Amino acid sequence: MRGWAAMVVGVLGTVGACGPDWDLSEGFALSIDINPTEYVGAFTEKAIRASFSSAISQLGGTVSSSSTQLIKVAYMETCACSQCGPNTVAIAKPNTDTLFFCPKVKTNQAAFTDAGVKHELLHILAKRGDHLPCETGGMMAADLACAKSLGTYNQADRAYLCSAGVLGGICR
């Protein structure tokens, strides 16, 4: 996978300490607000739900449709952010707890779409807009070509999340 063109993910707006306090020991719900005609190729509701479930599971949490901890997913025709590039497939808007997919997602590999969900989810949960250095090999590097195991969080990613005050799960 790393031989493919690098996928860059970005963060929309300023990430601050606004938004809910997340607790991985409580369930997470996912709300997808995407017009069915926007789904193309590997970009499907089923794929988004599978990526979200995998990410929450890796973090020691669970997915529950009745949870009050809600992450929203939407599609944005024009993605603009300070770190966006031509290969950006998703951006996060943490203060509204929303992950936005960008048009590039429609032409991307499933593994990069999965990695985009997992990367942006950590921005939302950690309420942080910064990235890890490439040398960490983590999913939270600005360029996913740095990830040593695409789609899997490493120790640096877990530290990124837990140092932000997230409760439960791997952050106990």
Image (spheres, rainbow, N blue to C red):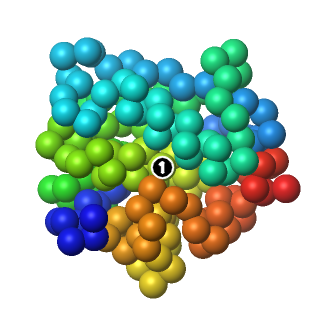
* Residue 90 pos. (x, y %): 33, 45
Given residues 58 and 74, the one toward you in this image is 58
77 relative to 136 in the view: left or right: left
- Based on the displayed image, in which of its 4 quarters is residue 158 positioned? bottom right
Residue farthest bottom in this picture: 135
Residue lying at 51% horizontally and 38% vertically, measured from the top left: 52
**From what the image shows, is residue 46 above or below residue 20?**
above
Given residues 22 and 28, the one toward you in this image is 28
* Residue 88 pos. (x, y %): 25, 52
**From what the image shows, is residue 39 above or below residue 80?**
above
Residue lying at 51% horizontally and 59% vertically, measured from the top left: 152
Residue lying at 52% horizontally and 52% vertically, measured from the top left: 123
Query: Can residue 60 be seen in the rendering of this structure?
Result: yes
80 relative to 61 in the view: left or right: left
* Residue 169 pos. (x, y %): 77, 49
Q: Looking at the image, how many numbered discs can be counted on the residues?
A: 1
Q: Quadrant of the C terminus?
A: bottom right
Please name the residue that numbered disc 1 is placed on: 118
- Based on the displayed image, in which of its 4 quarters is residue 5 positioned? bottom left
* Residue 11 pos. (x, y %): 39, 52
Q: Quadrant of the N terminus?
A: bottom left
Residue lying at 54% horizontally and 25% vertically, measured from the top left: 30
Query: Can residue 133 be seen in the rendering of this structure?
Result: no
148 relative to 153 in the view: left or right: left
141 relative to 1 in the view: left or right: right
Residue farthest right in this picture: 172
Q: Mark 1: few, some, or many residues within 10 Å (few <14, many ≥20)?
A: many
Kind of residue at disc 1:
Lys
Label 1 sits on a secondary structure element that is helix
